[in-house]
Image (spheres, rainbow, N blue to C red):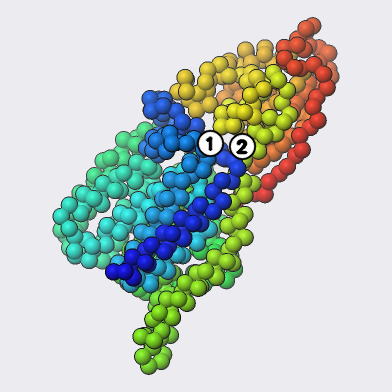
Amino acid sequence: MRTEVVAVAVPTAVMLAIGLWGLDRGGMWGDESVTFLVGRRSVPQIWQLLHGMDAVHGLYYLAIHVVLAVHPGEVVLRLPSVCGAAATAGLVAALGVRLARPRVGLWAGLIYAITPLTGHYAQEGRSYAIVSAGVAGATLLLVPVVQGRPRPGWWWRYGGLLALTSLLHELVVLALCAHAATLALARVPRAVWRGWLRAAGLAGAVVLPLVWVSQRQSGQVSWLVAPDWAKVEQLVRDFAAGPTGAVFWVCVALVAVGVTARRTAVFALPLLVLPPAILISVSQYRPLFHERYVLYALAGAPLLAAAGTDRVVEFLARLRPNGLRRYGRLGTLTGVLAVTAAFVQCLPLYRQDRSPAHRPENLAAVAAVAARDIRPGDPVLYLPSSWRLAALTYPKGFREARDIALTESGPRSGTLSGLETTPEELRRKLAGLKRLWVVADSKMLNSGRRPGNPTDRVKLAVVEEQFTARGKYVSGRVAFCLYVRRPAEAAAAPPGAHGAAGSGSGAATPAPTTRRPRPARW
């Protein structure tokens, strides 16, 4: 029993340490800022917002609301994900212990903990690490049932946990397909199937209203595209303890050997393969695939790799008399050292991932440039309006600016970034400005791409037709730009109009330094 406890506790502690390392990156990116802003609203305001967007994350936002009530900061925002990843590492270890032996559990938990993709989402202010813990816990609850030792009420615990996890993200229902495959491979009796169907029905009934509501909000994932073979290859590499080099190929080889360990493979292989395969197949017709939506499937890879390592150690031990006894502890230690070596080899990836430039954007950096360069009363436009997130998340950087398009705030209007004025009124407001700051999608400016929103189309048209860029700061997907009116346009402006900008007179400030961060790994 002590050995089993250590096999679970060590990976949990390692994952916790990796998750806490560099947790304060010094800035939030777009999705994290949404979590932060929504979590700081009141419960009625969150409920109102969910009617128009992000219903799939509703339960997570309510939980984060409670967390941020303790302290509204980016470190606290990410702590639930760190705890979720640590819990998952412990649950993966527990699965290895139950399905094989303590050393398999220890290795599996450690491999999960050092996988770069795990560490990435352990530091995200989103729900995916917590979802992974829920699926791993439900898989662990399935073990005694398959082994013929269920306890009274066990199916209700399994179904309840899956239902709760599905409310955190509806694509957890794909884990039910993996569990059904596990029952089929294990050739369980009909009584087990009946119990599982009742539990699965409970989870399905709970998540069905969420699916119905989220279908009405499907435009939020319209940016997704059908995954190709390159995406599949990237997923395979990301699910390994190291995405390149010797670590990757050793992981692939060990997983292949681990498939021959039937008791472990019956649980691990369907979990690893089926959810991503189903989502990728569906996404050929309706794109829904992103690796974070099936992050919970990653738990199957370390289980198979650990089982494969156990098979290799057993084979080597049998080559010599009394080998199993003599090399038992040595084999365990050797496996731990191998995992440590893989971690050291991937250390540059971990360090890179803890840099703010490694996320899609750094809104804190944008706000810092805005605080330095914006004059009191300078007008600012957000293109599209969703990039108002930068000012809402870090308001100190934009406190001197004047939001020229906003008419009603997000919390009052039940929207994320607020309601804006009409296209006609916006044209009138922009007519007399000599200088203008724009926070924009970096791919939208000068690309010929037209926004769908009429007000956003007016913003882009006026900026392109009447203004000239004098400076640009780029952080991934977001650009912070200074525009000044072209001389011909300035001469044609009506008398006295130049004062409409508050601080519009005088020379433009020096252009902010352009800095392009490295492309995000994930």
> Can residue 116 be seen at all in this image of the molecule?
yes
Secondary structure beneath dot 2 equals: helix
Query: What is the number of callouts on the image?
Result: 2
Query: Which residue carries the number 2 mark?
Result: 363
Q: Is residue 484 left or right of residue 366?
A: right
Rate crowding at label 1 as few (under 14), some (14 to 19) or many (20 or more) other CA atoms within 10 Å: many
Of label 1 and label 2, which has the lower sequence position? 1
Query: Where does residue 218 sit, x and y in percent of width and height?
Result: 44, 35
* Disc 1 residue type (three-letter): Ser
* Disc 2 residue type (three-letter): Leu
User: In the figure, 212 relative to 292: above or below?
Assistant: above
Q: Is residue 189 left or right of residue 67?
A: left
Query: Which residue carries the number 1 mark?
Result: 33
Rate crowding at label 2 as few (under 14), some (14 to 19) or many (20 or more) other CA atoms within 10 Å: many
User: In the figure, 228 relative to 434: above or below?
Assistant: below
At x 23%, y 50%, the residue is: 157
Front in this rendered view, residue 436 or 63: 63
At x 34%, y 44%, the residue is: 166
Q: Is residue 117 left or right of residue 52?
A: right
Query: Where does residue 376 sit, x and y in percent of width and height?
Result: 71, 20
Query: Where does residue 106 sit, x and y in percent of width and height?
Result: 40, 68
Front in this rendered view, residue 130 or 183: 130
Q: Is residue 108 left or right of residue 36?
A: left
At x 54%, y 65%, the residue is: 343
Secondary structure beneath dot 1 equals: helix
- Cα distance in 3D space between marks 1 and 2: 8 Å
User: In the figure, 425 relative to 189: above or below?
Assistant: above
* Residues under numbered marks 1 and 2 in contact, where contact means CB atoms less than 8 Å apart: yes
